């Protein structure tokens, strides 16, 4: 298979709830986050230069993961309860608790390519609460979106993300969004 020349088009956005036990980290089956509009990820970490012998002797780069935002057409109720820590009252309403810590999860998505879609998973993601915005309806309807800010930090073993590549196993590729992710071993 030839490598992609270009990537475009965000789709197939999912989250998989993370569980930490004494035997390690596991994830639930991915849950769809439909209506993905955009994702923006910026590398997090500093670079420092050590000088000796009147030159830049060594450069050190810290990989602290990524900071990002995910824009969705609408946030599903399951995400509010599974990841953001909302609860439901006796009438079935979503209730936000100031004491809720929320849960960590894996974030999965793909970009289309000219040859084959490239799939990604960020293994240790913590989302913040979304802002609430809205506008009145005018002559035409302008859809309002919701944006979730998040941090994707490395797991304890140092793994931050995985991305499909030319050599990705066909079964692993086809099951990317349907089976519980398993942290890779190197």
Image (cartoon, helix red, strand yellow):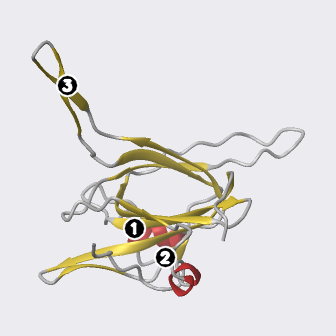
Which quadrant of the structure image shows residue 75? Answer: bottom right
Q: Secondary structure at mark 3?
A: strand
In terms of sequence position, does the residue under pointer 2 or pointer 1 come before the other? 2
Question: Label 2: how many residues lie within 10 Å, few (<14), some (14-19) or many (20+)?
Answer: few
Classify 138 as above or below 101: above
From the image, tell me which residue sits under label 2: 92
Label 1: which residue? 106
Residue under the image location 29 percent in, 54 percent down: 153
Q: Position of residue 15 (x, y in %)?
A: 46, 69
Between residues 102 and 70, which one lies in front from this camera angle?
Answer: 70
Q: In the image, is 11 to the left or to the right of 30?
A: right
Point out the residue furthest to the right here. 139
Give residue 59's position: percent from left, percent from top: 22, 31
Q: Residue at coordinates 55% horizontally, 79% vertically from top-left?
A: 173
Q: Give the class, few, some or many, for how many residues have Cα within 10 Å of label 1's Cα (few <14, many ≥20).
A: many
Label 2 vs label 3, nearer the camera: 3
Q: CA distance from mark 2 to mark 1?
A: 27 Å
Q: Is residue 91 left or right of residue 35?
A: left
């Amino acid at each position: 298979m030839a490598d992609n020349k270009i990537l475009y088009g965000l789709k197939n956005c999912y989250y998989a709830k993370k569980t930490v036990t004494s035997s390690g980290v596991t994830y639930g089956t991915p849950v769809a986050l439909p209506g993905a509009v955009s994702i923006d990820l910026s590398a997090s970490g500093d670079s420092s230069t050590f000088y000796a012998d009147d030159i830049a002797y060594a450069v050190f780069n810290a990989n602290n993961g990524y900071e990002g935002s995910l824009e969705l057409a609408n946030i599903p109720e399951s995400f509010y309860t599974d990841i953001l820590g909302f609860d439901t009252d006796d009438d079935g309403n979503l209730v936000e608790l100031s004491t809720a810590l929320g849960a960590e999860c894996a974030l999965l998505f793909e970009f289309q390519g000219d040859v084959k879609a490239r799939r990604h998973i960020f293994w240790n993601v913590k989302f913040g609460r979304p802002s609430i915005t809205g506008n009145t309806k005018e002559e035409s309807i302008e859809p309002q979106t919701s944006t979730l800010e998040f941090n994707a930090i490395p797991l304890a073993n140092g793994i931050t993300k995985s991305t499909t590549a030319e050599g990705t196993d066909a079964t692993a590729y086809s099951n990317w969004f349907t089976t519980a992710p398993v942290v890779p071993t190197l």
